Each structure stands twice: as C-alpha cells, then as structure tokens.
Amino acid sequence: MIYSSSYMFAKEEFGNSVHFLLKQLIFIIVGSGVCFVISKSKFNFWYKHSLKINVFFGFLILLTFIPSVGLALKGSSRWLKIGFFGIQPGEFTKYSILLASVYFFHQFPFWEKKQRIQNLIMLTFPMLLLIFQPDFGMFVLCMVNILFVCFMSQFPRKWFYSILLTGVIGMIGILFAAPYRVKRLLSYLDPWTDPQNSGFQIIQSFLAFALGGFSGAGIGNSQEKLFYLPEAHNDFIFSVIGEELGFIGVILLIALFVTFIYTGFRLSLKLQNHTKSLFGIAVVFAIGFQAALNMGVVLGLLPTKGLNLPFISYGGSSLLANAILLGLFFSILRSEGILGVSHGSNLDRAIRA
C-alpha cells in the first residue's frame, strides 16, 4: 500500500517511482534486526535506565532547533539530518516516556520528595520541548501514555485525578494558544466552511472512502492519490486503503489491529511480574491508541493531527520506534518463559488461553 499510494508522487518528486518503497524496505530490514537484538537483551537494563534514556531523546529533540543539525518542514522543527536520512526524535520519545512512566510510578513511593521532583523533571523534559517544536499531536500521545500508565499502576487515585485535571487543562490551554490549532478544530467541525484550505484534506479523505465503496477500486487505481490527497502515503494512507480496497479492506485492517491488541493484552496478563505486565499492557495500548487516533482523524471523527498509522504508514523513524518497542515487549515475554527458542509452543498456548 505504501508503493501504491506513493509511486506517482515519488516519480514526480524524485524521478523514481519506487523511492519510498525502497527506503521503507530498508527500514523494515533494519527494524527487524533491531527488534531481534533488543528481544534478546535484558528488560531490567532498559527499565533501570529509562529516565536517562528519556532525557537522551529529549536532548535529541533539543538538537532539532539548531539550524545546522535540525531540519524544519512545514513550520515545525521535528527532524534531525543524519547523512541521507532524517530521524524524528519525537517518534522515539513517545515510547521512552512510556517506559519511563512505568519506572516513575512504580518507584514513586520509595523516593524522597527531592528525588520525586528530579525524576518528574526527567520524565516531562521532552514533552516541554515537543510544545515548542511544535508537535501537539505527539505531545497529546505522550500525555495520554503517561496518564494511562498512572491509572493502571498503584499510584494513589486522589493524586491521579489531580494529574488528569491538570493535564486536560494544560492540553486545552496549549490547543487554544495557537490560532492554527483552533482553525483545525473549526475545520473538523465543518470542513466545508473552508474547502480549499483547512478543510481540503479531510474532504478529499471523505471522497476517497466514497469512491472505494464496498469492494474498492482495486490496488493501484486510487484517484485521490493523484495529487489530490496530501500525505497519501503517510498520515492519510488509510484513505487510500479505503479507496482501493473498499469497506472490506478497511474492516480487515481494523480486524488486524484488534487481533494485535487482544493478543497483546492476553500475553501481558500472563506475566507474573507486575512491572513487566504493566509495561506490556502499556505497549499494546500505545500502539492501539495511535492507530485509533489516525483512523478517527482520517474518517473525520477527530480533529486533524500529524499522526501516522503504526506499521502501515511510510516513515522510517516510526517503524524503528515500533520495532524497538516490540523488541522490549518480546524481551519481557522471553524473561517469563512465554516466548523463547526452547519454548516456542508456549506462545501458542498463551494465545489460545
């Protein structure tokens, strides 16, 4: 679907119709290797150093503000230039914050007041930088991930509701602080008030699903990807799937994500260690929640945000970040004997259970 949705744009922009396909294949190979290596590592190492890792990715975000190192696209400084490739640190930060949150809320009762404040700064440092990039969509994902881990942990409920209220008020304040975000919200409520500007993308997305019908126009036959639908191979690839594979393809894709979420939750609940179980549940939630957000945006159910569809959209940083996260998930499954070379059948038994 990445090739189908991008070959015309790639031919026009780079003179090579397989430009995006080849780059994504490279990231798939590299990501698979990274996932395998991390799955063989000890989860406790990453867990103990999670706050430091989170601060490290925060500094990578900080580097994006340096003109000679960072790469500004569409008014946002979200990329780092590394040779011929660009890396988006925010994609890794949303998962480093996830792991750091598990560590923070699990260890919170054992810290003194000074340690709590210091570690809270280490946890939230990258999020403050995301606001200035600006990357409001990634900020919302990080905030939701933190709140989810906080709710699922044994953190005191009265403190959780205070954090929840503060977080909601903060997100509303940040939303209305920027006029373009308010404009996006208004276009979400009624995209036809400005069909040539703020409402253009979502209207084209609606047309893609309408043209797809029940069975779709067939792979390669999308009309909207012919320079009508912006970000067709990235944030709005779900629209192209809807047009080319129709309602059947949409339902099958949703079914794949539902299966992933259900299986992930069941495997996580099998873990005897509470910390590992919480992290496993958080991993599945984070990926499932972003998938739901992307589909909601593309279907016009949510305001437009720059969030891709996990594993499906084009993007090397996103794919590598997801590979690292799954590697950590496989690592905790191996440590509990659910997944391993000598226990290959245990995974099947766990899924069936």
Image: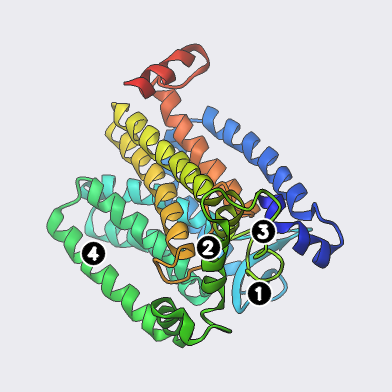
3D distance between C-alphas at marks 2 and 3 = 11 Å
- Give the secondary structure at mark 1: strand
The residue beneath circle 2 is 210
Q: Where is residue 237 in the image (x, y as percent from the top left)?
A: 59, 57
The residue beneath circle 3 is 222
CB under 8 Å between discs 2 and 3? no
Q: Position of residue 61 (x, y in %)?
A: 56, 65
Which amino acid is tagged 3? Ser
3D distance between C-alphas at marks 2 and 4 = 42 Å
Q: Which residue is drawn at 47% across and 30% down?
A: 331
Quarter of the image with the C terminus is top left
The residue beneath circle 4 is 163
Which amino acid is tagged 1? Ala
3D distance between C-alphas at marks 4 and 1 = 33 Å
The label on residue 131 is none
Neighbourhood count class around disc 1 (C-alpha, 10 Å): few under 14, some 14–19, many 20 upward: some
Q: Position of residue 42 (x, y in %)?
A: 47, 30
Q: Which of marks 4 and 1 is nearer the N terminus?
A: 1
Q: In this view, does 88 lie to the left or right of 258?
A: right
Give the foreground label among 2 and 4: 2
Which amino acid is tagged 2? Ala
Q: Where is residue 28 in the image (x, y as percent from the top left)?
A: 66, 41
3D distance between C-alphas at marks 1 and 2 = 35 Å
Against 90, is 150 above or below? above
The residue beneath circle 1 is 72
- Give the secondary structure at mark 2: helix
Neighbourhood count class around disc 4 (C-alpha, 10 Å): few under 14, some 14–19, many 20 upward: some
Viewer-closest of 338 and 291: 291
Neighbourhood count class around disc 2 (C-alpha, 10 Å): few under 14, some 14–19, many 20 upward: some
Q: Earlier in the sequence, mark 1 or mark 2?
A: 1
